[in-house]
Image: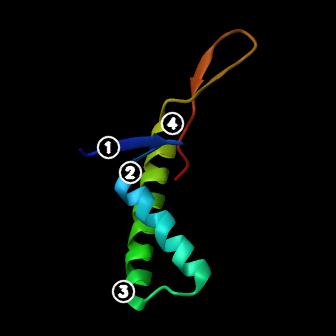
Amino acid sequence: MLRIFFIGGIFMEQAKIDRINELAKKQKEGTLSEEEKDEQAALRREYIDEWRKGAEETLENTYFVDENGKETKLKKKN
């Protein structure tokens, strides 16, 4: 069964989260191979991209409310 979790604005399969943690443990132990380093980099990139996507979606739906109750949509910087 494919399990997908929402973690702090990030949707990621549980198997990938488990693998990220496994590779981090191996890195701390100093037993990470070159192939695993590449895999770790790819998983980290995917995690960061998903985090960024979630943050952008949150900010796109953010409004400021002034003292009069007027809502102003947060403007995106260029």
Question: Which residue is tagged 4?
Answer: 58
Query: Do the residues under discs 1 and 2 have CB atoms within 8 angstroms?
Result: yes
Q: Nearer the viewer, residue 39 or 15?
A: 15
Precedes in sequence: disc 4 or disc 2 = 2
Q: Which quarter of the image is occupied by the N terminus?
A: top left
Question: Which residue is tagged 3?
Answer: 35
Whether residue 41 sits left or right of residue 71 in the image: it is left
**Within-10-Å neighbours for mark 3: few <14, some 14–19, many 20+:** few
Q: Amino acid at mark 4?
A: Thr
| Distance between the alpha carbons at the discs numbered 4 and 3 | 35 Å
| Distance between the alpha carbons at the discs numbered 3 and 1 | 26 Å
Precedes in sequence: disc 4 or disc 3 = 3
Precedes in sequence: disc 3 or disc 2 = 2
Position of residue 44 measured from the top left corner of the image (x, y, whole percent): 46, 67
| Distance between the alpha carbons at the discs numbered 4 and 1 | 23 Å
Question: Residue 14 got which mark?
Answer: 2
Position of residue 42 measured from the top left corner of the image (x, y, whole percent): 38, 72
Question: Which residue is tagged 1?
Answer: 3
Position of residue 32 measured from the top left corner of the image (x, y, whole percent): 48, 85
Query: Do the residues under discs 3 and 1 have CB atoms within 8 angstroms?
Result: no
Precedes in sequence: disc 4 or disc 1 = 1
Whether residue 74 sits left or right of residue 68 in the image: it is left
Whether residue 24 sits left or right of residue 35 in the image: it is right
The colour style of the image is rainbow
Name the residue: 59% across, 82% down: 29
Q: Quadrant of residue 69?
A: top right
Position of residue 8 measured from the top left corner of the image (x, y, whole percent): 54, 42
Where 70 falls versus 74 (above or below)?
above
| Distance between the alpha carbons at the discs numbered 3 and 2 | 21 Å
